[in-house]
Image (cartoon, grey):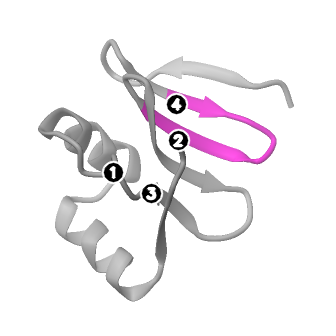
Amino acid sequence: MKTKIEQFHVKNQFVIKTDKGTYFQSYESIIVFEPIEGKTQLDKHFWDYSGTTGKYRNLFLMEDKKETEKKIASGEYELTNLN
């Protein structure tokens, strides 16, 4: 598969599809990585960086911040360094 980059709703928000999985990027920071196999990963420094990042992260994950926080706490999502 060739890497494919698409604008996500507005300027400076991107979805990047690769052979390894799908990334969500806000401005110049990777916020979320959904691998083909394994746990969804959120960048530990930037996953909740700003209101704009949060708004589009929620749209990408199709959930609100409280649900994301529950999944982090339960271990369903992994916090890691994606940048």
Q: For residue 27, which numbered disc appears in the image?
A: none
- Residue 44's spot in the image, x, y percent? 39, 58
Which tag, 4 or 2, sits closer to the chain's start? Answer: 4
Name the residue tied to disc 4. 15
Name the residue tied to disc 1. 47
Name the residue tied to disc 3. 42
Q: CA–CA distance between discs 4 and 3?
A: 14 Å
Q: CA–CA distance between discs 3 and 2?
A: 10 Å
Name the residue tied to disc 2. 83
Q: Nearer the viewer, mark 4 or mark 2?
A: 2
Which tag, 1 or 4, sits closer to the chain's start? Answer: 4
Main secondary structure along the magenta-highlighted residues: strand
Magenta region: which residues?
15-25
Q: CA–CA distance between discs 4 and 2?
A: 15 Å
- Say which element carries label 3: strand
- The reply to whether discs 1 and 3 touch (Cβ–Cβ < 8 Å) is yes
